Amino acid sequence: MRLTVGAPLAASLLLLALACQEKEPAGTPTPTITVTATPRATATPTATPTPRATVTPAATPTPEVTPTPTEKPPTLAAPSPSPTSELLTVSFIDVGQGDAILIDRGDTDILVDGGPTSADVLAYLQGQGIADIDFLVATHPHADHIGGLADVLAQYQVNEIWVNGDTATSQTYQNFAAAVAAEGATVREPTRGYSTQIDGLDIAVLNPSQLTGDPNEDSVVFRLTCGKVSVLLTGDATNDSEASILPTGLGLDSDVLKVGHHGSSTSTSTAFLAGVTPEDAVISVGAGNTYGHPAQDTLDRLAAVGATVYRTDQNGTVVLTSDCNTYSITTSGPAVTPTVTHVPSPTTPTPTSLEDACGPCAATDCNCSDFDTQAEAQACLNADPTDPFNLDGDNDGIPCESLP
């Protein structure tokens, strides 16, 4: 027996059948980072000499946590400058073989990189009572620097994100890019010459000038200054990055240097150290890493300039505390550096002429034999980056490389 169904009922049944069918899942597009603000600035070369201060170690425990998403507070307006009595802390967090640095002053918090995973950095942020993050800086897209940042972005309100402009094909980078897109924060690609100020902190970007395609060489490098105290943060910048910075005349002299690329031999050149003259140096590195970091020749170069070296694999988390006139350094971990008191160094006047920088040969024609050390030749080149005496024959920013 055949049942005949009327037209209205047939149409209804057809619509019901269509509604019950599962939709075909759409393909998931590859996340990308959209730059919402790209500053370009003309740098005015300045060199700010800085005094030295006190170093005193202590301990900062870092318990392991599991990140849990929380409701984000509303975006805050940019804080106004705070009184100079507010302390600055710069924490070089022990995250193993990677980088994560927290800068805190008053209501301002800046996170530079996030380590290879999120557990250590999230535990530290929570332990410090951080409520939100003003700037998040991803110096470059390698996993040991951005691995923990996706979870940081999921848990914290971030107002502005800095990236260097390089991308990667790794899943870690894809997770980070998706988290940046979901955050909805302002995204910048700051380049050499860009500067900003927040809560009495001056930030001057020294690298990159332009992208080379090498994420390490393109690392975001910036100098943080608070009053008389300065810290230079270098990401994984290479000798080539350093050589490109030296001739610019931008201020390099800093009390504390975050050593580039975990102390690799391809960073922290003699010429760069001559420009930075660090009193203290911090190497963020994992114990027993397979890369041989830090390289012995890098440690030797740091010793040659008299820098006290702190290593997260030996000293744990390293914390600089400053009233912006002097600073102290405390550490945690099995190997604690003894207390050292530094007498502030006298201000070195900036050379006013080639003769001041290069010596008597400037009246005629200088060559490498006129200098006893490479640092003396470097000072001559820095006085006039056009290199009128052709001391830098290969144009790498390092003159008279055969000199000691």
Image (cartoon, helix red, strand yellow):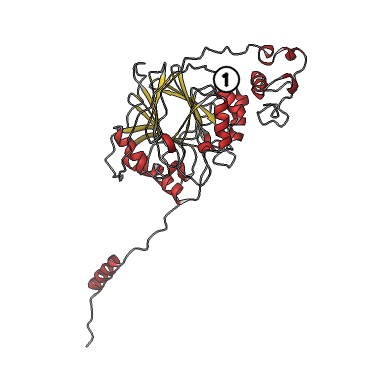
Task: Write down the quadrant of residue 13 in the picture.
Answer: bottom left
Q: Position of residue 397 (x, y in %)?
A: 65, 28
Whether residue 42 is visible here, answered yes or no, is no
Q: Nearer the viewer, residue 331 or 326?
A: 331
* Residue at 53%, 45% in the rendered image: 291
The picture places residue 371, in percent across and down from the top left corner, at 71, 20
Q: Is residue 26 left or right of residue 379?
A: left
Q: Determine the residue located farthest toward the right in the rendered image.
A: 364
Q: Secondary structure at mark 1?
A: loop
Dot 1 crowding, Cα within 10 Å, few <14, some 14–19, many 20+: few
The residue under the point 56% across, 13% down is: 348
Residue 309, given in percent of the width and then of the height, sits at 48, 29
Find disc 1 in the rendering and name its residue. 45
Vertical arrangement, residue 321 with respect to residue 128, above or below: above
Q: In the image, residue 206 lies at what x, y percent? A: 54, 28
Which quadrant holds residue 393?
Answer: top right
Q: Nearer the viewer, residue 266 or 195?
A: 266
Q: Considering depth in this image, is 136 or 301 the residue closer to the camera?
A: 301
Q: Is residue 237 left or right of residue 82?
A: right
Q: Residue at x 73, y 23 (%)?
A: 368
